[in-house]
Amino acid sequence: MEDWELIIVGAGPAGLAAAIYAARSGLKTLILDEKMAGGTIVDAPIIENYPGFLKINGGELAEKMVTQCKHFGVTFHELESASNLVIKEKNSYLETNKITYNFKGIILATGSHYKTIGVKGESKFKGRGVSYCGVCDGPLFKGKRIMVIGGGNTAVTTTLYLSGIVSEVLVVHRRDAFRSEQALVNEIKSKNNIQIFWNTQIQEILGDKLVNSVLVIDNKTKEIKKLSVDAVFVQIGEAPNNQIAHNTGIKMNAKGHVIVDSLQRTNIPGIFAAGDLTNHPIKQIGTAVGQGITAGLEAFAFIRQPYYRK
């Protein structure tokens, strides 16, 4: 069993920002993640709305954050998953797949995971033409005809990225307009290899060993079409990774987000949360970083007690 002042679960933007501020404040800080550090921003091909960078690759931005954490003495345990959080008035501890840790304060920054569409063929062809990460799998379909499902910022950004790799992108969106930043919408309209299917939903993903077509339905006319594609990129948003908060007494809302106050405090003293896991309505890198900073400083205040606000 190891002892730490602060443990941060999740090494995405929120967790990394929290770690920087906590470590600079002098806390003995451990950050752990079941995957490699960086979180889902690693999957972002292009980031244009993070202050200070006109354009940066998500993986590059994550790497810069990790380097900064290490510079201030943060310890990283990657490929280590938190399995059980036990909260007691004294001697709370965290169990992982490798070891048990005692802590004085903990920040939950486990982020979110990709939502699935739940249609026939989706799970069957996952990794064989069905993907949730454009930057990861897009290069595999160079010169091919592919489909993107969704209409938010993530879907539009992925579509723009893929349009520079594949021969044609078919975008299927259940509404009649994108729910995305206008700058991205303007850019997508300027591309001649992007075809948009409004008011349309996917019904089934078809193929043999690999994806070769999909069935879609027009929600207005009820017409069903079979479209030939080599891949389907599902980009319909994310859901919170809240498993570690279950059965702990930590309050969550109806959607499963951990409820925090303006100082990132949960209903349990010493337990903080930040980023996409929380009930903050805006899910952006910048807001996650801001929440992480607040959580890191507030955790320091709680642990060292110089100015803790009750």
Image (tube, rainbow, N blue to C red):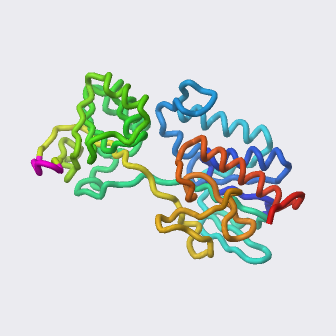
Question: Residue 166 appears in which quarter of the rendering?
Answer: top left
Q: Residue at x 77, y 57 (%)?
A: 299
* Residue 197 horizontal/vertical position (percent): 22, 39
Vertical comparison of 48 with 290: above or below: above
Say left or right for 222 vs 235.
Answer: left
Q: Would you say the magenta stretch is mainly helix, strand or loop?
A: loop
Q: Residue 220 lies in magenta, yes or no? A: yes
* Residue 208 horizontal/vertical position (percent): 18, 47
Q: Residue at x 83, y 53 (%)?
A: 27
Q: Residue at x 74, y 72 (%)?
A: 92
Magenta residues? 219-224
* Residue 157 horizontal/vertical position (percent): 41, 34
Q: Nearer the viewer, residue 106 or 1?
A: 106
Q: Residue 138 lies in magenta, yes or no? A: no
* Residue 292 horizontal/vertical position (percent): 67, 49
Residue at the farthest right position: 306
Say left or right for 204 vs 238.
Answer: left
Determine if residue 217 is in view.
Answer: no
Q: Residue at x 71, y 61 (%)?
A: 106
Determine if residue 67 is in view.
Answer: yes
